[in-house]
Image: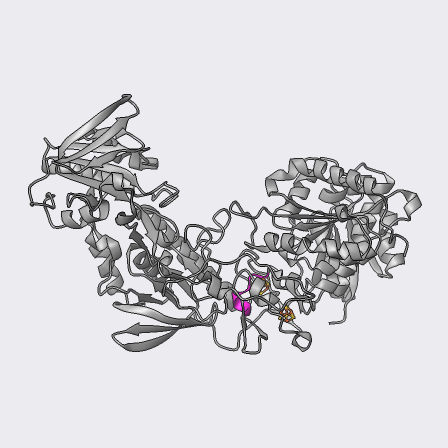
Amino acid sequence: MEKKIAVYICTGCGIGDALDIEQLGKIATDENSIPICQKHSNLCGQEGVDLIKKDITDNGVNTIVITACSHRVMYDAFNFDNCIVDRVNVREQVVWCQKPGEEDTQMMAEDYLRMGIAKVKAMQLPEPFKPEEEISRDILVVGGGLTGMTSALEASKAGYSVVLVEKEAELGGFQKNVKEIATAPYKDIQDNDIKNLIDAVTNNTKIKVYTGATVERTSGSPGIFKTVIKQNGSNAEHRVGAIVLAAGWKPYDPTKLNKRLGFGESPNVITNVMFEESYKEGRITRPSDGKDVANIAFLQCAGSRDPKHLPYCSAVCCITALKQAIRVKRQNADANVYMVYKELRTPGQSEDIYRKAQEEGVIFIRCQDPEVKTGEGLTVEANDELLGETVIMEDLDMVVLATGMVPVSAFGKDITQETKEEGEKKDGEELEVPLDVIRRSNLLNLEYRQGPELPALSNDFPDSHFICFPYESRRTGIYPAGCVRRPMGISTATGDATGAVMKAIQCIELTARGAAVHPRAGDMTYPEFNMSRCTQCKRCTVECPFGAINEDEKANPLPQPTRCRRCGVCMGACPERIISFKNYSVPMIGDMIKSIGVPEEDEEKPRILVLACENDAYPALDMAGLHRMQYNAWVRVIPLRCLGSMNLVWIADTLSKGIDGVLLLGCKHGDDYQCHFIKGSELASIRLSKVSETLNRLALESERVRFETVSITDYDRLPALLDEFAAAIDEVGPNPFKGW
Ligand code: SF4
Ligand code: SF4
């Protein structure tokens, strides 16, 4: 498309008071020969928007630079069909954070307009990605337990057909062995009505159920997944648009527990799951001789919240134990029922079940480290923290250990090392990439170059971003739900199932439109590869955090756009710089950097480039402006989709241009990560560690380039951080490339 560029400058929100608008307009008209440059005192209002629309219809304008507020606001007002639009943020990041009427403030605004013009010149109109195959709107649900069945029903209610695969011979999962439940309204224990759910699923014509079946193979990508289901030795193929993984959990192996808890020493020391299975049969009896239970102790957190076993809380054991204790009391009101706990966790309304157990006469003992003795009789010794004395529970018929939940994805061989493949070493430079933890658990059997199952982040849960994006996994279009995602009880799992299905539907519908799913929902761009210059170095395939790029036998990348999150990490990784998006590319950012005006050394106006992650750092800078916090006027900020999309050539471009310092603002990484693209920020810091070599080559000081992690709530410390970096750059002195 031949571009017809127009620049619009808003003078409202204090912009016109702080800047010389006529002078600013000359950056468009005189410096860049852009014929249309209009000013308006309220550009986002109807009159201002109509002004732009008139230029589109009457003057053929198709490329628009809005010089006004941040792109994070007023996006609906400044949304023009079939036009390239960029927003130059002179409100939050110039006039609201700088002194009005000052030369430095004016220079900053002018640079931002230069950068905006350079950007739109390099941008192209996005075109949606449409796969050749027709998009399937069916949903595959793996797991026929409570979560899987709820997912299937919810999807069918929304009008989507479902293929439900259950490995056992019957639907129902763990819950089908549970006689009574303690869930909402939590006033008392209730009969388990899982049978009704099974019937609803079985009789639903939109749900195709496979029992005694497994997923043999899953290939393709969102919208165009192909799945092979194996049942009774034969295979069935289905095309699906998205997948809900509701494969459930298994109890923690009690043989791994501390011997102090007595498992394996007496048949009367059992787990909560074993209790559940026996009480389904009717009376609760002593395993060794079938005698009715008169004295029983429940020991909580048997392995859970223990760094040597399961470091997390298994969420349901306390409520389950309360239910079981009430059941014993109802069978024999005179029974001595003890509950030994570290902390009893009954969040929300489940507190009512705790009260109910108290009313029924269950005795509670708070103790961190009880000991089970299995000599003559069965005894538990517990140091009661509240009484401050040792309590001895003698002549017990049974001890029930509350073992926790382990996601089924945790079982199977750890193939993390096998899936690691190093790219070609460039100039002796190691390709270091944080490894994805993947096990061969045979749940999905993905034909993904990066491994056959969902990668786990911690404790084998295939979660992706627990802070911002629950239900997401590291594989687009595949949503874990229920206890495979994290330990949870019935009501939470029911809500989780619904949430995961909503994500699956969102994925299908956005994919059908050719748009990104999340977190850049609606983005119509996707990475395009100029394969004629590819050296098959594998960096893009190895570094993509989402497994979106397969590979042929010659190591050519095979991008799968509907799996892609549009983070640009591959673009940052590619040493040949051949990956680009229609509106985001290595040359585009390079042109923006090159457009920054760099004053001569004797003007004593250093320049600092800030490459800021647009998920947290850039909004934090906007918030600093919103709070009218002032910071150094030497900075020029460019937002990046993710700091992982940073290509090292930008650092070289910046320093060779004479800019004095580069500050990278990305998200926290490590266990407490907050990066929206999981590994992007970490990859950026790994890449940056190699920059010192470049700096040495340019005979520059390494202090000129710094990496900082910030979250959106750090806005109040950003001005001080920028000022301190500016002072450090001032100390180092001018970039020797200035003026070249
Ligand atoms: S690195 Fe990001 S942009 Fe590139 S293919 Fe993977 S998900 Fe897509
Ligand atoms: S596209 Fe770039 S990163 Fe990927 S293999 Fe080719 S040269 Fe390497």
User: Which is more toward the observer, 226 or 505?
Assistant: 226
Indicate the position of residue 351 as horizontal and vertical percent values.
30, 34
Left/right placement of residue 728 relative to residue 349 reads right
User: Which residue is outermost to the right?
Assistant: 602
At x 65%, y 58%, the residue is 645
Toward which corner of the image does residue 138 lie, by quadrant? bottom left
Q: Quadrant of the N terminus?
A: bottom right
Q: Residue furthest front?
A: 375
Residue depicted at x 51% and y 48%: 468
Asked if residue 437 lies left or right of residue 121, the reply is left
Q: Residue at x 71, y 43 (%)?
A: 92
Residue 689 appears in the figure: yes
Q: In the visual, does 158 lie left or right of 388?
A: right
Q: Position of residue 504 (x, y in %)?
A: 43, 61
Q: Quadrant of residue 683?
A: bottom right
Q: Assign the C terminus to one quadrant of the image.
A: bottom right
Q: Which residues are magenta?
A: 560-566
Pick the front one: 232 or 457: 457
- Is 24 rendered above or below residue 143? above
